[in-house]
Image (cartoon, rainbow, N blue to C red):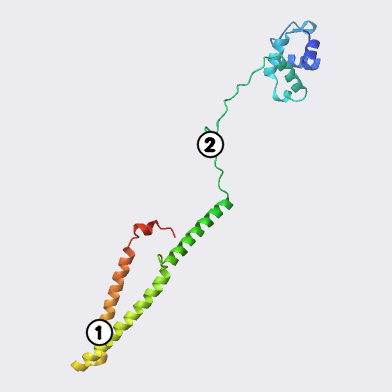
Amino acid sequence: MNATQLATELGISKGRVSQYVSEGKLDGCFTGDGRARRFDVGKVRAALDQRLDPGQMLGNGASTKRRIRTALPDVVPVEQPPVSEEDSPPAEAPMSRYELARTLNAEEAARKSRRENLLAEGSLVLAESAGREAARALSRELAQVEDLLRRGARVIADDLGVDFKAARKILLDLWRDHRTLRAEALGQKAAEADLDDSESEADF
């Protein structure tokens, strides 16, 4: 097959055939020189299929590529075995900021409802309310103790003939020193106290 026939077969110009020859793309695909040059179309197709550069795959080169491949054996694609749903578990979509906010709000609402229910049942006492009530009770007790000490000082002064104010001061000073020491001891004990199992598990 001469150059003209090869150009017709590949759908390209005769000048392009000459270009391929001069570039060495068809080395080993023909015999003879000049007008006597004869091409082996099978070898030409194989050579051009391997040697056309990416730029020549566009335009006329794309058509040449298609014509070249018509003479090559078809490659049957290997079918991949289908992937069952059991083999490929669906990926969990990441939680959006909106969904996360809704989840946090729902959890907080559940905790609030639980606190309210426990308060209504009397199973839970707020620390603030309990603290105020304890402070009021303690103030009443202290007032009664100090009143008792003043009356005791009056009895001592009358019975022993000593100064009432001096006796009252001695008794009150002793009581207040004792109260301070007890408060410090109780505070230390409270700081070291741990939650029991039920308190640790509760989520308020």
Above-or-below relation of 175 to 194: below
Provide the secondary structure element on which disc 2 rests: loop
The answer, for residue 26, to whether it is visible in the render is no
Mark nearer the N terminus (1 vs 2): 2
Please state the horizontal and vertical placement of residue 142, each as a whole percent of the image.
32, 80
- Residue at the (80%, 10%) spot, across then down: 5
- Residue at the (31%, 67%) spot, across then down: 188
Disc 2 marks a residue whose amino acid type is: Pro
The answer, for residue 109, to whether it is visible in the render is yes
Q: How many marks?
A: 2
Disc 1 marks a residue whose amino acid type is: Leu
The N terminus: image quadrant = top right
The C terminus: image quadrant = bottom left
Frontmost residue, 182 versus 10: 182
Please state the horizontal and vertical placement of residue 203, each as a whole percent of the image.
43, 58
Residue reaching furthest to the left: 160
Quadrant hosting residue 193: bottom left
Q: Residues within 10 Å of mark 2 (few under 14, many from 20)?
A: few
- Residue at the (53%, 57%) spot, across then down: 105
Provide the secondary structure element on which disc 1 rests: helix
Disc 1 versus disc 2: nearer the observer: 2
Q: Is residue 76 left or right of residue 3?
A: left
| Residue holding disc 1 | 171
Quadrant hosting residue 59: top right
Residue reaching furthest to the front: 121
Residue 89 numbered tag? 2
